[in-house]
Amino acid sequence: MKPQKQDTTNKVVHLQKEVTTSPSSTLPDLIITSIKAKERIDKLQEFVKTSLVRGVDYGSIDGFSKPTLLKPGAEKLCDAFGFSKTVDVINRIEQWDVGIFSYEVRVTLSNKETGVVEAEGIGSCNNKEASFRYQDPFTIVNTLLKMAKKRALIDAVLSATRASGLFTQDIEDFPKPDRKGGDAPATKHQLTTLFRIVKQMDMSNGVAKEMMKIKFDVDKSILLTKQQAHEFIQDLLLLQYAQQHGNDAVIDHIQQH
């Protein structure tokens, strides 16, 4: 075999191109080998294990094997992978006369060194969602926009880092788990708790009944099932939390729980 010629001017070694003789090959050329891909996955898992904090960067939900990625964790992954963020509001509905607000946001992640776009994420939020349905829509406009941005960021990070195998995006995306006692009637303790929270919030009985009617199609608390009473109590506690701590605190509360 003849030795390869060297370009002494540019210090480049010119290698002969090997010709493949397999006409039946239909597989595309891979950008990285399977070994390299596995190395990247292993490094990602190691970073998650050593650098992300449960309850702060990601949240675990009882009954589910895959945790949900939270905003602090998404931002840490952005820094670790060297991504810069661009945020664009691509759809905005603000009907001030009837109190309907909805936002759709796109977050673009680019490599800081090369400028190459790594991934885009889409997130939306509106005041008809369960977490915001019973709040004053005119006071949570900024909260809705922040939540849409958060969801778009997490969507983009999961795509860019290939971390969707480790995390899901939002707690809202989980299917509802089966719970024992779901069809049993509400307990006396649950009903007492409902009345106490409604009184503490200075909420009228009419408003409470309307909430039950919309969500559970019942207008009396004694008609609630045990599971429905549990969900209604959680809704009331979230509203009470918003009254006491403000809407921005609700976002943190939702993200960490």
Image: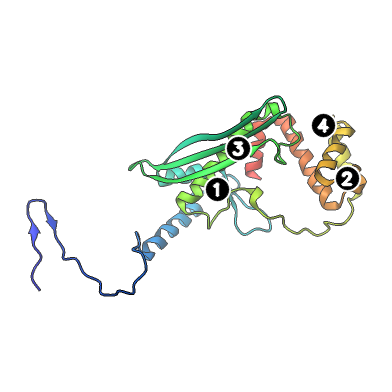
The answer to whether 252 is drawn above or below residue 42 in the figure is above
Which residue in the protein does label 2 denote? 218
Q: Which mark is residue 53?
A: 1
- Quarter residue 210 falls in: top right
The residue tagged with tag 4: helix, strand or loop?
loop
Q: Earlier in the sequence, mark 2 or mark 3?
A: 3
> What is the distance, in whole Å, between disc 2 and disc 3 at their CAs?
31 Å
Tell me the amino acid under the disc marked 2: Val
The answer to whether 246 is drawn above or below residue 54 in the figure is above
Mark 4 Cα-neighbour bin, 10 Å: few <14, some 14–19, many ≥20: some
Q: Earlier in the sequence, mark 1 or mark 4?
A: 1
Which residue in the protein does label 4 denote? 201
> What is the distance, in whole Å, between disc 4 and disc 2 at their CAs?
21 Å
Residue at image position (54%, 56%) is 166
> What is the distance, in whole Å, between disc 2 and disc 1 at their CAs?
41 Å
Tell me the amino acid under the disc marked 3: Met
The residue tagged with tag 2: helix, strand or loop?
loop
The N terminus, quarter of image? bottom left
Which residue in the protein does label 3 denote? 147
Tell me the amino acid under the disc marked 4: Met
| Image position of 95 (left or right of 164) | right
Counting from the top left corner in percent of width and height, residue 204 is at 87, 31
> What is the distance, in whole Å, between disc 1 and disc 4 at their CAs?
34 Å
Residue at image position (85%, 29%) is 202
Q: Earlier in the sequence, mark 2 or mark 1?
A: 1
> What is the distance, in whole Å, between disc 3 and disc 1 at their CAs?
21 Å
Whether residues under marks 2 and 3 lie with C-beta atoms below 8 angstroms apart, the answer is no
Whether residues under marks 4 and 2 lie with C-beta atoms below 8 angstroms apart, the answer is no
